[in-house]
Image (cartoon, helix red, strand yellow):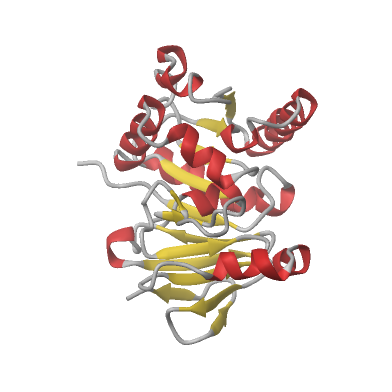
Amino acid sequence: MTKVGALALVGSGEYLPAMQELETELLRSGISNGKPNRFLQIPTAAGEESKKRLAYWQELGAEQTRRIGTVQNFLPIFNREDAFNPKYVSQIKSAGLIYFSGGDPGYLADTLVGSPAWDAIKSSWQEGASLAGCSAGAMAMSSDIPNFFRVKEEGIPGFGLIPNIRPIPHYDKFFGWLPDSAAKIVMRAPQDTTIIGIDENTALVTGLDGSTSLSENTWEVHGLGGVHILRGAPPHKYLRGERIIFS
């Protein structure tokens, strides 16, 4: 019987040497669950960016897959129409690691939620593939994404895999980038939501070694920085190797 795959929320650093160890472990976890040795990159969050920028993400991923020793599959799901394309959807199950890279979290969720592509991604993860989201990809895993463009409206519905957790990526730099009004939006989450900050080159992972699981809400910190509890639980900074249990 297969098990739900690992899930990683990454603050930054997708496809870079700093994340090579984690991405290798995630891929091996998926392979151990019977999935192929294939690294599937889904760049949807950057779908509104330039062709040059998208090519940058593709080459960055190619370099990482060479270092890891796997096969790259850069799946060009850039818009809602692509998310319904059977040609792309059919490739999703052929991966040990499915990875959402950075960009716009709201655009990512709006493009994929309710689509055959997302159904295939979720199904493959439930059958043992590892699933990771970096920056925008991490934010989209929640059920509620901050709406930076319409500040008086509710957040944008996300994938709902971590319904009561809101990750803030790039945490060690994030609030330095934002005006106060945007920072308030990030912290204005549904009442029962735990807000966490994930530093750059850092990830919060569950289900990687078989001893943790999403159903138990037990997670472990990986990478160079820390994970910060900001709201919804006692404030604390967790470092590499430390575990967090969300109530």
Q: Nearer the viewer, residue 177 or 4?
A: 177
* Quadrant the N terminus occupies: top left
Residue in view at x 58 percent, y 65 percent: 185
Residue found farthest to the top:
87
* Vertical side of 84 occupied by 46: above or below: below
* Vertical side of 202 occupied by 119: above or below: above
Residue found farthest to the left:
1
Residue in view at x 48 percent, y 19 percent: 81
In this picture, residue 47 sits left or right of residue 144: right
Q: Nearer the viewer, residue 150 or 134?
A: 150
Residue 221 x/y as whole percent? 54, 68
Residue in view at x 66 percent, y 52 percent: 19
**To which quarter of the image does residue 202 belong?**
bottom right
Q: Nearer the viewer, residue 88 or 193?
A: 193
Residue 239 x/y as whole percent? 59, 75
In this picture, residue 22 sits left or right of residue 12: left
Residue 247 x/y as whole percent? 32, 76
Circle count: 0
Residue 30 x/y as whole percent? 42, 41
Asked whether residue 51 is in view, the answer is yes
Q: Nearer the viewer, residue 108 or 88?
A: 108
